[in-house]
Amino acid sequence: MNLMEIAKKKQMKENLPVFNVGDTVKVHVKIKEGERARIQVFEA
């Protein structure tokens, strides 16, 4: 196993929710603007 696979395995969650094509999901992204930081929610 190479280093990328080891790092990836450590970061992966094991209990992911089930979702299918056509489902709506929300993604929370932390955005830094200079000294300030905020969470932006994208829905698709």
Image (spheres, grey):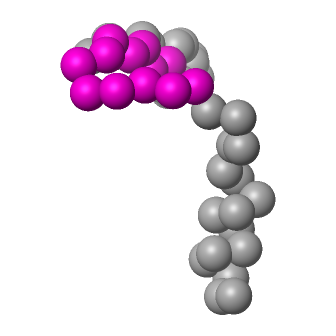
Which residues lie in the magenta part? Answer: 17-29
State yes or no: residue 25 in magenta.
yes
Quarter where residue 42 is shown: top left
Residue in the picture at 58% in, 25% down: 17
Question: In x, y percent, where is residue 4?
Answer: 61, 77
Quadrant of the image containing the C terminus: top left
Residue in the picture at 66% in, 50% down: 12
Q: Is residue 12 visible?
A: yes
Residue 17 falls left or right of residue 3: left
Q: How many marks?
A: 0
Residue sitting at the far bottom: 2
Image position of 18 with respect to 43: above or below: below
Residue 17 falls left or right of residue 26: right
Quarter where residue 36 is shown: top right
Residue 17 falls left or right of residue 1: left
Image position of 3 with respect to 39: above or below: below
Image position of 25 with respect to 31: above or below: above
Camera-side residue of 9 and 28: 9
State yes or no: residue 16 in magenta.
no
Magenta stretch secondary structure, dominant: loop
Residue sitting at the far right: 10
Residue in the picture at 64% in, 64% down: 8
Quarter where residue 1 is shown: bottom right
Question: In x, y percent, where is residue 35?
Answer: 58, 23
